Amino acid sequence: MEFDQLFDLLERNYIKYNSISFIESDPICVPHRFSKLQDIEIAGFFSATLAWGLRKTIIKKSMELMALFDYSPYDFIINHTEQDLKSLKGFKHRTFNYTDLLYFIHFFNQFYAINESLESIFIPKEKGAASIKSGIIDFYKLFISDEYFPTRTGKHVASPSKKSACKRINMFLRWMVRKDSMGVDFGLWGRIKPSQLICPCDVHVEREARKLNLISRKQVNWDMAEELTNNLKKFDSSDPVKYDFALFGMGLDN
């Protein structure tokens, strides 16, 4: 496919799928239930973390968790009691269980006690960084550094240092950083540029990207996610990850 044809295809489908109607059937609908920065961050991080399997199930389990938090995730994280934690005991989604949930709550409790926003962890320390890679690595290091960290919980937070494509983290970061007039992504963070984001590579995105020769690497890993993003930058260098909407939507329809 010629460059102009591919550009037109990506733009048309970006416009088609980046709409308010996209929200209700996507896990991003969960943080959209909230208006407070910290509630959006926490609800977004949990719904992205639980993003395995059918979207309907992901949304259902994420909303179940928000109900257990009394629909005030930040207040629950900061002010919960031991009895409150016991009420979470039956929560499970695939391999994410009570042990994992307790540590996530502990981590967020410690973090928000001294920080206003998760953005501060993800900001790349190197000036003019081309991507968010080092910020994700820094987040992972901090996440696993606590003395109460259970080894099993590490599988629920990915890192480029482990060669992971980091689909769920990259999806969460897209939600927090991207901002346009359509209102799907939140654009709450202003210190990370959309150009630094890496495209989330789920099965739909990967399949469509291969069809369009946007990726050549066989293994789904960080290098492949970077390859895809760099190719998407040829069409929009300032906001390449907007084409996640196009590739994901086309993948769902095909």
Image (tube, grey):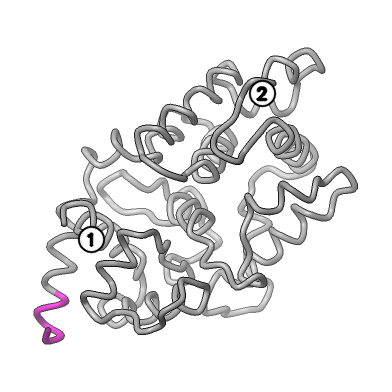
Quarter of the figure with residue 88:
top right
Q: Which quadrant, please, contains the C terminus?
A: bottom left
- The relative height of residue 190 versus residue 11 in the rendered view (above or below) is above
Q: Amino acid at mark 1?
A: Ala
* Mark 2: amino acid: Asp
Rendered location of residue 186, percent (x, y): 41, 46
Q: List the residue tagged with mark 1.
A: 246
Query: What distance separates the C-alpha of mark 1 from that of mark 2?
Result: 36 Å
Q: Main secondary structure of the magenta part?
A: helix
Segment colored magenta: 1-7
| Residue 150 lies in the magenta-colored region | no
Q: Is residue 153 left or right of residue 224?
A: right
Residue 140 position within the rendered picture, expressed as x and y whole percent measured from the top left:
70, 59
Q: Earlier in the sequence, mark 1 or mark 2?
A: 2
Q: Residue furthest right?
A: 147
Residue depicted at 57% across the width and 80% down the height: 128
Dot 2 lies on which element? helix
